[in-house]
Protein backbone atom coordinates (compact mmCIF):
# COMPACT_ATOMS: atom_id res chain seq x y z
CA UNK A 1 0.00 0.00 0.00
CA UNK A 2 1.92 3.05 -1.19
CA UNK A 3 1.53 5.98 1.15
CA UNK A 4 2.49 9.58 0.56
CA UNK A 5 5.69 8.98 2.48
CA UNK A 6 6.63 6.04 0.29
CA UNK A 7 6.03 8.19 -2.73
CA UNK A 8 8.32 10.84 -1.27
CA UNK A 9 10.94 8.23 -0.51
CA UNK A 10 10.97 7.28 -4.14
CA UNK A 11 10.78 10.80 -5.55
CA UNK A 12 12.76 12.94 -3.13
CA UNK A 13 13.35 15.68 -5.67
CA UNK A 14 9.62 16.34 -5.99
CA UNK A 15 9.41 17.25 -2.31
CA UNK A 16 12.43 19.52 -2.59
CA UNK A 17 10.96 21.31 -5.59
CA UNK A 18 7.57 21.69 -3.90
CA UNK A 19 9.14 23.16 -0.78
CA UNK A 20 11.38 25.44 -2.82
CA UNK A 21 8.39 26.76 -4.80
CA UNK A 22 6.41 27.38 -1.60
CA UNK A 23 9.43 29.10 -0.08
CA UNK A 24 9.80 31.31 -3.13
CA UNK A 25 6.11 32.22 -3.06
CA UNK A 26 6.34 33.13 0.62
CA UNK A 27 9.45 35.23 -0.06
CA UNK A 28 7.75 36.93 -2.98
CA UNK A 29 4.71 37.71 -0.86
CA UNK A 30 6.94 38.95 1.93
CA UNK A 31 8.74 41.30 -0.45
CA UNK A 32 5.63 42.77 -2.06
CA UNK A 33 2.48 42.46 0.06
CA UNK A 34 1.29 45.72 1.61
CA UNK A 35 4.13 47.79 0.25
CA UNK A 36 3.54 51.49 0.67
CA UNK A 37 6.27 53.78 -0.48
CA UNK A 38 8.86 53.71 -3.23
CA UNK A 39 10.14 50.30 -4.35
CA UNK A 40 13.69 51.61 -4.15
CA UNK A 41 13.22 51.70 -0.38
CA UNK A 42 10.90 48.74 0.15
CA UNK A 43 12.92 46.18 -1.79
CA UNK A 44 16.35 46.68 -0.16
CA UNK A 45 14.74 47.09 3.28
CA UNK A 46 12.71 43.93 3.05
CA UNK A 47 15.37 42.10 1.07
CA UNK A 48 17.76 42.54 3.94
CA UNK A 49 15.23 41.15 6.39
CA UNK A 50 14.51 38.26 4.06
CA UNK A 51 18.20 37.45 3.69
CA UNK A 52 18.67 37.47 7.46
CA UNK A 53 15.66 35.23 7.97
CA UNK A 54 16.79 32.77 5.34
CA UNK A 55 20.24 32.67 6.90
CA UNK A 56 18.85 32.12 10.39
CA UNK A 57 16.42 29.47 9.19
CA UNK A 58 19.17 27.61 7.38
CA UNK A 59 21.54 27.86 10.36
CA UNK A 60 18.98 26.61 12.85
CA UNK A 61 17.75 23.75 10.67
CA UNK A 62 21.19 22.47 9.70
CA UNK A 63 22.72 22.87 13.17
CA UNK A 64 19.82 21.01 14.78
CA UNK A 65 19.94 18.06 12.42
CA UNK A 66 23.72 17.75 12.59
CA UNK A 67 23.62 17.98 16.37
CA UNK A 68 21.02 15.24 16.48
CA UNK A 69 23.13 13.11 14.18
CA UNK A 70 26.19 13.48 16.38
CA UNK A 71 24.28 12.69 19.54
CA UNK A 72 22.29 9.91 17.80
CA UNK A 73 19.20 11.39 19.37
CA UNK A 74 16.06 13.06 18.10
CA UNK A 75 15.20 15.15 21.13
CA UNK A 76 18.38 17.09 21.80
CA UNK A 77 19.00 20.35 19.99
CA UNK A 78 21.83 22.85 20.39
CA UNK A 79 19.37 25.23 22.06
CA UNK A 80 18.01 22.70 24.51
CA UNK A 81 21.62 21.91 25.39
CA UNK A 82 22.19 25.57 26.20
CA UNK A 83 24.43 26.49 23.27
CA UNK A 84 22.68 29.72 22.42
CA UNK A 85 22.54 30.89 26.02
CA UNK A 86 26.28 30.22 26.03
CA UNK A 87 26.55 32.69 23.18
CA UNK A 88 24.68 35.31 25.18
CA UNK A 89 26.94 34.62 28.16
CA UNK A 90 30.08 35.08 26.09
CA UNK A 91 28.81 38.33 24.65
CA UNK A 92 27.77 39.64 28.05
CA UNK A 93 31.08 38.69 29.64
CA UNK A 94 32.91 40.46 26.85
CA UNK A 95 31.12 43.76 27.44
CA UNK A 96 31.32 43.23 31.18
CA UNK A 97 35.04 42.52 31.23
CA UNK A 98 36.47 44.88 28.63
CA UNK A 99 33.74 47.48 28.89
CA UNK A 100 31.42 48.75 26.22
CA UNK A 101 33.97 51.37 25.12
CA UNK A 102 36.39 48.71 23.97
CA UNK A 103 33.58 46.50 22.72
CA UNK A 104 32.14 49.30 20.61
CA UNK A 105 35.59 50.10 19.27
CA UNK A 106 35.66 46.61 17.84
CA UNK A 107 33.81 46.42 14.58
CA UNK A 108 30.64 44.33 14.78
CA UNK A 109 32.15 41.72 12.50
CA UNK A 110 35.35 41.43 14.55
CA UNK A 111 33.20 41.05 17.61
CA UNK A 112 31.13 38.42 15.89
CA UNK A 113 34.17 36.43 14.83
CA UNK A 114 35.69 36.66 18.32
CA UNK A 115 32.48 35.30 19.73
CA UNK A 116 32.35 32.48 17.23
CA UNK A 117 35.88 31.50 18.21
CA UNK A 118 35.01 31.60 21.90
CA UNK A 119 31.88 29.56 21.23
CA UNK A 120 33.84 26.87 19.45
CA UNK A 121 36.32 26.69 22.30
CA UNK A 122 33.76 26.62 25.07
CA UNK A 123 31.24 24.34 23.44
CA UNK A 124 34.09 22.04 22.50
CA UNK A 125 35.18 21.75 26.10
CA UNK A 126 31.68 21.44 27.45
CA UNK A 127 30.06 19.09 25.05
CA UNK A 128 32.94 16.90 23.98
CA UNK A 129 33.15 15.17 27.33
CA UNK A 130 29.41 14.96 27.53
CA UNK A 131 29.15 13.02 24.31
CA UNK A 132 32.48 11.23 24.17
CA UNK A 133 31.42 8.82 26.90
CA UNK A 134 29.70 5.62 25.90
CA UNK A 135 26.26 4.51 27.04
CA UNK A 136 25.16 7.88 28.35
CA UNK A 137 21.79 8.18 29.92
CA UNK A 138 19.69 10.41 27.70
CA UNK A 139 17.83 11.84 30.65
CA UNK A 140 21.07 12.82 32.33
CA UNK A 141 22.33 14.56 29.20
CA UNK A 142 19.08 16.49 28.70
CA UNK A 143 19.06 17.46 32.35
CA UNK A 144 22.65 18.67 32.25
CA UNK A 145 21.89 20.66 29.11
CA UNK A 146 18.84 22.34 30.60
CA UNK A 147 20.73 23.16 33.79
CA UNK A 148 23.68 24.55 31.86
CA UNK A 149 21.25 26.69 29.88
CA UNK A 150 19.77 28.10 33.07
CA UNK A 151 23.25 28.61 34.55
CA UNK A 152 24.47 30.52 31.49
CA UNK A 153 21.34 32.65 31.43
CA UNK A 154 21.54 33.43 35.14
CA UNK A 155 25.21 34.36 34.91
CA UNK A 156 24.43 36.67 32.00
CA UNK A 157 21.55 38.20 33.95
CA UNK A 158 23.77 38.72 36.97
CA UNK A 159 26.41 40.54 34.95
CA UNK A 160 23.79 42.57 33.11
CA UNK A 161 22.35 43.70 36.42
CA UNK A 162 25.60 44.87 37.92
CA UNK A 163 26.94 46.61 34.85
CA UNK A 164 26.41 50.33 34.29
CA UNK A 165 23.09 51.19 32.60
CA UNK A 166 24.93 52.63 29.59
CA UNK A 167 26.90 49.47 29.10
CA UNK A 168 23.73 47.47 29.45
CA UNK A 169 21.94 49.50 26.80
CA UNK A 170 24.79 48.93 24.38
CA UNK A 171 24.87 45.24 25.16
CA UNK A 172 21.13 44.96 24.73
CA UNK A 173 21.44 46.59 21.38
CA UNK A 174 24.02 44.04 20.30
CA UNK A 175 22.35 41.04 21.84
CA UNK A 176 18.98 41.10 20.25
CA UNK A 177 19.30 42.57 16.86
CA UNK A 178 15.90 41.44 15.62
CA UNK A 179 14.87 41.24 12.02
CA UNK A 180 13.91 44.88 11.95
CA UNK A 181 17.36 46.14 12.84
CA UNK A 182 20.11 44.19 11.15
CA UNK A 183 23.71 45.18 10.84
CA UNK A 184 24.82 44.75 7.23
CA UNK A 185 28.40 43.93 8.19
CA UNK A 186 27.37 41.22 10.62
CA UNK A 187 24.97 39.83 8.05
CA UNK A 188 27.79 39.60 5.50
CA UNK A 189 30.21 37.97 7.92
CA UNK A 190 27.49 35.59 9.08
CA UNK A 191 26.67 34.64 5.49
CA UNK A 192 30.33 33.98 4.76
CA UNK A 193 30.73 31.81 7.86
CA UNK A 194 27.66 29.82 6.95
CA UNK A 195 28.95 29.39 3.42
CA UNK A 196 32.31 28.18 4.68
CA UNK A 197 30.94 25.55 7.04
CA UNK A 198 28.41 24.45 4.43
CA UNK A 199 31.17 23.88 1.90
CA UNK A 200 32.93 21.66 4.42
CA UNK A 201 29.69 19.87 5.31
CA UNK A 202 28.76 19.19 1.71
CA UNK A 203 32.02 17.32 1.16
CA UNK A 204 31.40 15.15 4.22
CA UNK A 205 27.69 14.69 3.80
CA UNK A 206 27.86 10.94 3.18
CA UNK A 207 29.98 10.43 6.25
CA UNK A 208 27.24 12.08 8.32
CA UNK A 209 24.88 9.32 7.20
CA UNK A 210 27.21 6.71 8.69
CA UNK A 211 27.29 8.53 12.03
CA UNK A 212 23.57 7.78 12.35
CA UNK A 213 24.50 4.18 13.05
CA UNK A 214 26.20 5.24 16.27
CA UNK A 215 29.81 5.34 17.42
CA UNK A 216 30.90 1.72 17.13
CA UNK A 217 29.41 0.89 13.73
CA UNK A 218 30.74 4.19 12.37
CA UNK A 219 34.27 3.34 13.49
CA UNK A 220 33.87 -0.18 12.15
CA UNK A 221 32.98 1.35 8.77
CA UNK A 222 36.16 3.38 8.78
CA UNK A 223 34.95 6.81 9.92
CA UNK A 224 37.45 8.77 11.96
CA UNK A 225 34.82 9.22 14.63
CA UNK A 226 36.48 11.63 17.01
CA UNK A 227 37.68 13.98 14.28
CA UNK A 228 34.34 13.96 12.47
CA UNK A 229 32.34 14.60 15.62
CA UNK A 230 34.61 17.46 16.66
CA UNK A 231 34.31 19.00 13.22
CA UNK A 232 30.53 18.74 13.32
CA UNK A 233 30.43 20.35 16.75
CA UNK A 234 32.48 23.22 15.32
CA UNK A 235 30.05 23.57 12.43
CA UNK A 236 27.18 23.56 14.91
CA UNK A 237 28.89 26.19 17.07
CA UNK A 238 29.34 28.47 14.05
CA UNK A 239 25.74 28.04 12.91
CA UNK A 240 24.33 28.62 16.39
CA UNK A 241 26.47 31.76 16.70
CA UNK A 242 25.07 33.01 13.42
CA UNK A 243 21.46 32.41 14.33
CA UNK A 244 21.84 33.74 17.86
CA UNK A 245 23.72 36.82 16.71
CA UNK A 246 20.92 37.62 14.30
CA UNK A 247 17.81 36.78 16.35
CA UNK A 248 18.75 35.66 19.82
CA UNK A 249 17.97 32.31 21.42
CA UNK A 250 15.18 30.19 19.94
CA UNK A 251 14.70 27.13 22.06
CA UNK A 252 12.31 24.96 20.13
CA UNK A 253 12.33 26.16 16.55
CA UNK A 254 15.12 23.80 15.52
CA UNK A 255 13.39 20.85 17.08
CA UNK A 256 10.15 21.68 15.29
CA UNK A 257 11.87 21.98 11.93
CA UNK A 258 13.99 18.86 12.34
CA UNK A 259 11.13 16.64 13.38
CA UNK A 260 8.99 17.96 10.53
CA UNK A 261 11.82 17.16 8.14
CA UNK A 262 12.23 13.60 9.44
CA UNK A 263 8.49 13.01 9.21
CA UNK A 264 8.12 14.47 5.74
CA UNK A 265 11.09 12.76 4.16
CA UNK A 266 11.10 9.43 5.98
CA UNK A 267 14.72 9.45 4.87
CA UNK A 268 17.98 9.40 6.76
CA UNK A 269 20.14 10.70 3.95
CA UNK A 270 21.62 14.04 4.90
CA UNK A 271 22.01 15.09 1.30
CA UNK A 272 18.22 15.14 1.21
CA UNK A 273 17.32 15.77 4.83
CA UNK A 274 19.37 18.95 5.28
CA UNK A 275 17.97 20.86 2.28
CA UNK A 276 14.42 19.81 3.18
CA UNK A 277 14.89 20.97 6.78
CA UNK A 278 16.39 24.27 5.63
CA UNK A 279 13.50 24.88 3.23
CA UNK A 280 10.91 24.06 5.88
CA UNK A 281 12.62 26.47 8.25
CA UNK A 282 12.68 29.25 5.68
CA UNK A 283 9.04 28.64 4.85
CA UNK A 284 7.99 28.75 8.51
CA UNK A 285 10.07 31.77 9.36
CA UNK A 286 9.25 33.89 6.31
CA UNK A 287 5.63 32.77 6.29
CA UNK A 288 5.36 33.40 10.00
CA UNK A 289 6.90 36.83 9.78
CA UNK A 290 4.56 37.68 6.89
CA UNK A 291 1.51 36.68 8.90
CA UNK A 292 2.88 38.50 11.91
CA UNK A 293 3.47 41.74 10.05
CA UNK A 294 0.36 41.76 7.86
CA UNK A 295 -2.26 39.93 9.93
CA UNK A 296 -1.31 40.69 13.52
CA UNK A 297 0.23 44.03 12.57
CA UNK A 298 3.33 43.41 14.74
CA UNK A 299 1.13 42.87 17.77
CA UNK A 300 2.94 39.75 18.87
CA UNK A 301 6.42 38.32 18.51
CA UNK A 302 7.10 35.61 15.96
CA UNK A 303 9.18 33.74 18.51
CA UNK A 304 6.13 33.34 20.74
CA UNK A 305 4.18 31.57 18.01
CA UNK A 306 7.11 29.42 16.97
CA UNK A 307 8.11 28.50 20.50
CA UNK A 308 4.53 27.58 21.27
CA UNK A 309 4.35 25.16 18.33
CA UNK A 310 7.88 23.90 18.97
CA UNK A 311 7.24 23.33 22.65
CA UNK A 312 4.22 21.20 21.87
CA UNK A 313 6.30 19.23 19.38
CA UNK A 314 8.94 18.70 22.09
CA UNK A 315 6.43 17.31 24.57
CA UNK A 316 5.00 15.09 21.86
CA UNK A 317 8.44 13.72 21.01
CA UNK A 318 9.34 13.12 24.66
CA UNK A 319 6.11 11.21 25.24
CA UNK A 320 6.50 9.15 22.10
CA UNK A 321 10.23 9.01 21.56
CA UNK A 322 11.67 7.83 24.86
CA UNK A 323 9.62 4.66 24.76
CA UNK A 324 11.23 3.70 21.44
CA UNK B 1 46.98 -12.61 10.40
CA UNK B 2 45.78 -10.77 13.49
CA UNK B 3 48.51 -10.66 16.10
CA UNK B 4 47.57 -9.50 19.59
CA UNK B 5 50.34 -9.12 22.14
CA UNK B 6 49.95 -8.61 25.89
CA UNK B 7 46.57 -6.92 25.50
CA UNK B 8 45.31 -5.40 28.72
CA UNK B 9 42.26 -3.28 29.39
CA UNK B 10 41.66 -1.70 32.76
CA UNK B 11 38.83 0.47 34.04
CA UNK B 12 40.37 2.10 37.09
CA UNK B 13 41.65 -0.78 39.17
CA UNK B 14 39.48 -3.40 37.52
CA UNK B 15 41.30 -5.43 34.89
CA UNK B 16 38.76 -6.52 32.30
CA UNK B 17 41.25 -8.08 29.93
CA UNK B 18 44.62 -9.12 31.30
CA UNK B 19 47.70 -9.80 29.25
CA UNK B 20 46.10 -11.63 26.34
CA UNK B 21 48.33 -12.73 23.46
CA UNK B 22 46.65 -14.34 20.50
CA UNK B 23 47.28 -15.14 16.83
CA UNK B 24 44.38 -15.42 14.42
CA UNK B 25 45.39 -16.76 11.02
CA UNK B 26 43.78 -15.77 7.74
CA UNK B 27 41.00 -18.22 6.85
CA UNK B 28 39.04 -20.29 9.35
CA UNK B 29 36.68 -19.86 12.26
CA UNK B 30 37.88 -19.02 15.76
CA UNK B 31 35.37 -19.07 18.61
CA UNK B 32 35.81 -17.32 21.92
CA UNK B 33 33.97 -18.97 24.81
CA UNK B 34 33.81 -18.28 28.52
CA UNK B 35 31.43 -17.32 31.30
CA UNK B 36 29.68 -13.91 31.53
CA UNK B 37 32.07 -11.14 32.39
CA UNK B 38 35.11 -13.04 31.16
CA UNK B 39 36.14 -10.14 28.91
CA UNK B 40 35.19 -11.74 25.60
CA UNK B 41 33.36 -8.75 24.17
CA UNK B 42 36.02 -6.36 25.45
CA UNK B 43 38.71 -8.44 23.75
CA UNK B 44 36.76 -8.22 20.50
CA UNK B 45 36.47 -4.45 20.89
CA UNK B 46 40.21 -4.17 21.51
CA UNK B 47 41.03 -6.27 18.45
CA UNK B 48 38.80 -4.07 16.31
CA UNK B 49 39.97 -0.65 17.65
CA UNK B 50 36.53 0.19 19.09
CA UNK B 51 38.26 0.48 22.46
CA UNK B 52 41.81 1.68 23.05
CA UNK B 53 43.92 -0.85 24.95
CA UNK B 54 45.47 0.11 28.27
CA UNK B 55 48.58 -1.85 27.30
CA UNK B 56 49.65 -4.19 24.53
CA UNK B 57 49.23 -4.08 20.76
CA UNK B 58 47.13 -5.48 17.94
CA UNK B 59 48.47 -5.89 14.42
CA UNK B 60 46.13 -6.69 11.55
CA UNK B 61 48.22 -7.75 8.56
CA UNK B 62 51.09 -5.69 10.03
CA UNK B 63 48.86 -2.63 10.56
CA UNK B 64 48.78 -1.39 14.13
CA UNK B 65 45.10 -0.77 14.92
CA UNK B 66 45.97 2.04 17.33
CA UNK B 67 47.62 4.15 14.63
CA UNK B 68 46.50 2.89 11.21
CA UNK B 69 43.91 5.04 9.40
CA UNK B 70 40.42 3.87 10.27
CA UNK B 71 39.26 3.66 6.66
CA UNK B 72 42.17 1.40 5.67
CA UNK B 73 41.36 -0.93 8.55
CA UNK B 74 37.67 -0.91 7.61
CA UNK B 75 38.55 -2.60 4.32
CA UNK B 76 40.35 -5.42 6.13
CA UNK B 77 38.45 -5.95 9.32
CA UNK B 78 34.78 -5.67 10.21
CA UNK B 79 33.04 -6.04 13.53
CA UNK B 80 29.50 -6.73 14.63
CA UNK B 81 28.76 -5.83 18.20
CA UNK B 82 26.21 -7.33 20.48
CA UNK B 83 23.85 -4.46 21.14
CA UNK B 84 22.89 -2.76 17.94
CA UNK B 85 20.54 0.06 18.64
CA UNK B 86 20.06 2.61 15.90
CA UNK B 87 18.31 5.90 16.43
CA UNK B 88 17.73 6.39 12.72
CA UNK B 89 14.88 4.80 10.81
CA UNK B 90 16.47 2.60 8.17
CA UNK B 91 15.31 -0.15 5.88
CA UNK B 92 17.18 -3.44 5.69
CA UNK B 93 18.59 -2.42 2.34
CA UNK B 94 19.76 0.97 3.66
CA UNK B 95 21.54 -0.78 6.51
CA UNK B 96 23.19 -3.44 4.39
CA UNK B 97 24.31 -0.77 1.90
CA UNK B 98 26.33 0.88 4.69
CA UNK B 99 28.57 -2.18 4.56
CA UNK B 100 29.90 -0.86 1.25
CA UNK B 101 30.82 2.53 2.71
CA UNK B 102 34.51 1.72 3.27
CA UNK B 103 34.80 0.81 -0.41
CA UNK B 104 32.64 3.37 -2.18
CA UNK B 105 32.44 6.22 0.37
CA UNK B 106 28.67 6.35 0.07
CA UNK B 107 28.45 6.35 -3.72
CA UNK B 108 27.55 2.73 -4.44
CA UNK B 109 28.57 1.42 -7.85
CA UNK B 110 26.79 -1.32 -9.75
CA UNK B 111 29.21 -3.82 -8.28
CA UNK B 112 28.29 -2.58 -4.80
CA UNK B 113 24.58 -2.97 -5.58
CA UNK B 114 25.19 -6.56 -6.65
CA UNK B 115 27.07 -7.30 -3.43
CA UNK B 116 24.30 -5.73 -1.38
CA UNK B 117 21.76 -7.96 -3.12
CA UNK B 118 23.98 -10.99 -2.54
CA UNK B 119 24.34 -10.30 1.17
CA UNK B 120 20.58 -9.83 1.54
CA UNK B 121 19.99 -13.11 -0.26
CA UNK B 122 22.60 -15.05 1.76
CA UNK B 123 20.80 -14.11 4.96
CA UNK B 124 17.37 -14.90 3.49
CA UNK B 125 16.12 -11.33 3.80
CA UNK B 126 14.87 -10.77 0.23
CA UNK B 127 11.28 -10.50 1.39
CA UNK B 128 12.18 -7.88 3.99
CA UNK B 129 14.63 -5.72 2.10
CA UNK B 130 12.35 -2.66 2.09
CA UNK B 131 11.11 -3.13 5.65
CA UNK B 132 12.18 -0.75 8.39
CA UNK B 133 14.42 -2.25 11.04
CA UNK B 134 12.12 -1.17 13.86
CA UNK B 135 9.30 -3.13 12.26
CA UNK B 136 11.16 -6.43 12.34
CA UNK B 137 11.72 -9.14 14.91
CA UNK B 138 14.97 -9.36 16.86
CA UNK B 139 16.18 -12.32 14.83
CA UNK B 140 15.45 -10.66 11.49
CA UNK B 141 17.22 -7.52 12.63
CA UNK B 142 20.22 -9.55 13.77
CA UNK B 143 20.41 -11.14 10.33
CA UNK B 144 20.26 -7.71 8.72
CA UNK B 145 23.25 -6.59 10.79
CA UNK B 146 25.16 -9.71 9.85
CA UNK B 147 24.33 -9.00 6.21
CA UNK B 148 25.83 -5.53 6.58
CA UNK B 149 29.03 -6.90 8.06
CA UNK B 150 29.35 -9.57 5.35
CA UNK B 151 28.72 -6.89 2.73
CA UNK B 152 31.77 -5.07 4.03
CA UNK B 153 33.70 -7.99 2.51
CA UNK B 154 36.75 -7.92 4.77
CA UNK B 155 39.38 -10.62 5.31
CA UNK B 156 38.70 -10.59 9.04
CA UNK B 157 35.18 -10.60 10.45
CA UNK B 158 34.65 -10.24 14.19
CA UNK B 159 31.20 -10.98 15.58
CA UNK B 160 29.99 -10.68 19.14
CA UNK B 161 27.28 -13.29 19.61
CA UNK B 162 26.10 -13.53 16.01
CA UNK B 163 23.46 -16.06 17.08
CA UNK B 164 21.73 -13.56 19.36
CA UNK B 165 17.94 -13.76 19.01
CA UNK B 166 18.10 -16.42 16.30
CA UNK B 167 15.85 -19.46 16.33
CA UNK B 168 17.33 -22.95 15.89
CA UNK B 169 16.92 -22.99 12.15
CA UNK B 170 18.52 -19.59 11.63
CA UNK B 171 21.26 -20.19 14.20
CA UNK B 172 22.38 -23.36 12.46
CA UNK B 173 21.95 -21.67 9.08
CA UNK B 174 24.10 -18.75 10.22
CA UNK B 175 26.92 -21.02 11.39
CA UNK B 176 26.80 -22.98 8.13
CA UNK B 177 26.94 -19.72 6.17
CA UNK B 178 29.93 -18.50 8.19
CA UNK B 179 31.70 -21.83 7.70
CA UNK B 180 31.02 -21.73 3.96
CA UNK B 181 32.27 -18.16 3.52
CA UNK B 182 35.36 -18.91 5.59
CA UNK B 183 36.17 -21.91 3.38
CA UNK B 184 35.28 -20.47 -0.01
CA UNK B 185 36.78 -17.01 0.35
CA UNK B 186 39.56 -17.79 2.81
CA UNK B 187 38.20 -15.32 5.37
CA UNK B 188 38.84 -15.39 9.10
CA UNK B 189 35.88 -15.25 11.47
CA UNK B 190 36.26 -14.57 15.17
CA UNK B 191 33.03 -15.29 17.01
CA UNK B 192 32.00 -14.86 20.61
CA UNK B 193 29.69 -17.81 21.22
CA UNK B 194 27.72 -18.87 24.27
CA UNK B 195 26.73 -22.28 22.97
CA UNK B 196 29.83 -24.45 23.30
CA UNK B 197 28.32 -27.00 20.93
CA UNK B 198 28.10 -24.55 18.04
CA UNK B 199 31.71 -23.67 18.81
CA UNK B 200 32.63 -27.34 18.83
CA UNK B 201 30.99 -28.20 15.52
CA UNK B 202 31.82 -25.17 13.42
CA UNK B 203 35.16 -23.79 14.61
CA UNK B 204 38.72 -24.65 13.73
CA UNK B 205 40.01 -23.14 16.91
CA UNK B 206 38.50 -22.34 20.30
CA UNK B 207 39.78 -19.69 22.68
CA UNK B 208 38.60 -19.89 26.28
CA UNK B 209 38.61 -16.89 28.61
CA UNK B 210 37.96 -16.46 32.30
CA UNK B 211 38.29 -13.37 34.45
CA UNK B 212 39.89 -11.43 31.64
CA UNK B 213 42.62 -13.93 30.95
CA UNK B 214 43.02 -16.34 28.07
CA UNK B 215 43.22 -19.65 29.90
CA UNK B 216 43.05 -22.24 27.13
CA UNK B 217 43.12 -22.44 23.37
CA UNK B 218 43.17 -25.26 20.89
CA UNK B 219 41.11 -27.27 18.42
CA UNK B 220 37.57 -28.22 19.54
CA UNK B 221 38.58 -31.77 20.43
CA UNK B 222 41.00 -30.42 23.03
CA UNK B 223 38.64 -27.90 24.59
CA UNK B 224 35.51 -30.08 24.62
CA UNK B 225 36.74 -32.17 27.54
CA UNK B 226 34.93 -32.32 30.85
CA UNK B 227 37.96 -31.29 32.88
CA UNK B 228 38.78 -28.36 30.57
CA UNK B 229 35.16 -27.16 30.58
CA UNK B 230 35.10 -27.35 34.37
CA UNK B 231 38.16 -25.15 34.50
CA UNK B 232 36.46 -22.59 32.21
CA UNK B 233 32.88 -22.58 33.47
CA UNK B 234 33.23 -24.11 36.95
CA UNK B 235 30.48 -26.65 36.32
CA UNK B 236 30.54 -30.31 35.42
CA UNK B 237 29.60 -30.82 31.80
CA UNK B 238 29.53 -34.38 30.49
CA UNK B 239 30.85 -34.56 26.93
CA UNK B 240 29.52 -37.11 24.45
CA UNK B 241 30.60 -37.90 20.94
CA UNK B 242 27.69 -38.00 18.51
CA UNK B 243 28.23 -38.54 14.78
CA UNK B 244 31.87 -37.67 15.18
CA UNK B 245 31.15 -34.33 16.92
CA UNK B 246 31.92 -33.66 20.56
CA UNK B 247 28.93 -32.15 22.35
CA UNK B 248 28.75 -30.85 25.89
CA UNK B 249 25.52 -31.64 27.73
CA UNK B 250 25.20 -28.59 29.93
CA UNK B 251 21.44 -28.69 30.30
CA UNK B 252 21.34 -30.59 33.60
Image: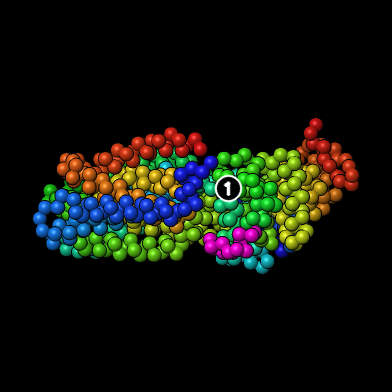
For the point 67% across and 56% down, the residue is B118
Classify mark 1: residues with Cα within 10 Å, few (<14), some (14-19) or many (20+): few
User: Based on the displayed image, in which of its 4 quarters is residue A235 positioned?
Assistant: bottom left
- Residue closest to the eye, B187 or A128: B187
State whether the magenta stretch is mostly helix, strand or loop.
helix
Image position of B12 (left or right of A17): right
- The residue sitting at the bottom extreme is B62
For the point 65% across and 48% down, the residue is B126
Asked if one can make out residue A228 in the rendered structure from this viewpoint, the answer is no
Residue at disc 1, secondary structure: loop
Say if the magenta span includes residue A214: no
Image position of A246 (left or right of B88): left
- Residue closest to the eye, B165 or B68: B165
Applied colour scheme: rainbow
For the point 39% across and 58% down, the residue is A234
**What percent of the width, then of the height, locates residue A184?**
20, 62
Say if the magenta span includes residue B104: yes
Circle 1 residue:
B130
**What percent of the width, then of the height, locates residue B90?**
53, 48
The chain letter under disc 1 is B
Q: How many marks?
A: 1
For the point 42% across and 46% down, the residue is A264
In this view, A66 is above or below B197? below
User: Based on the displayed image, in which of its 4 quarters is residue B184 positioned?
Assistant: bottom right
- Residue closest to the eye, B130 or A202: B130
Which residues are the magenta region?
Answer: B103-115
Image position of A114 (left or right of B111): left
**What percent of the width, then of the height, locates residue B4?**
68, 60
**What percent of the width, then of the height, locates residue A102?**
17, 61
Image position of A171 (left or right of B74): left
Screen quadrant of the C terminus of chain B: top right
Amino acid sequence: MPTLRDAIRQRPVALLVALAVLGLLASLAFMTVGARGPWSFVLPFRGMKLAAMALVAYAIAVSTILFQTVTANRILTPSIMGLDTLYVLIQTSLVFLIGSGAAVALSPSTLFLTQVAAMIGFSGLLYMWLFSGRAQSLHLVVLIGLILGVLFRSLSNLMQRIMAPNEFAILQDRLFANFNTIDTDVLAVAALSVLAVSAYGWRKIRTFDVLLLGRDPAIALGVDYKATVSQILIVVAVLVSVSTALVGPTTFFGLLVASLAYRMTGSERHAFLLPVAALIAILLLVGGQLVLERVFAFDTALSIIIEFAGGIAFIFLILRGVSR
Amino acid sequence: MIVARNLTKAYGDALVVRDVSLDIPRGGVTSIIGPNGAGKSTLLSLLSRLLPATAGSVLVDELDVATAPSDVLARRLSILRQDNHIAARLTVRDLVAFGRFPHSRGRPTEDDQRRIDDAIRYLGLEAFSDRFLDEMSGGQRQRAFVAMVLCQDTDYVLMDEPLNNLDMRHAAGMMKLIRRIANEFNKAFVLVLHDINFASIYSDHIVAMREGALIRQGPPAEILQSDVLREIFEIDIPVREIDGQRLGLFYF
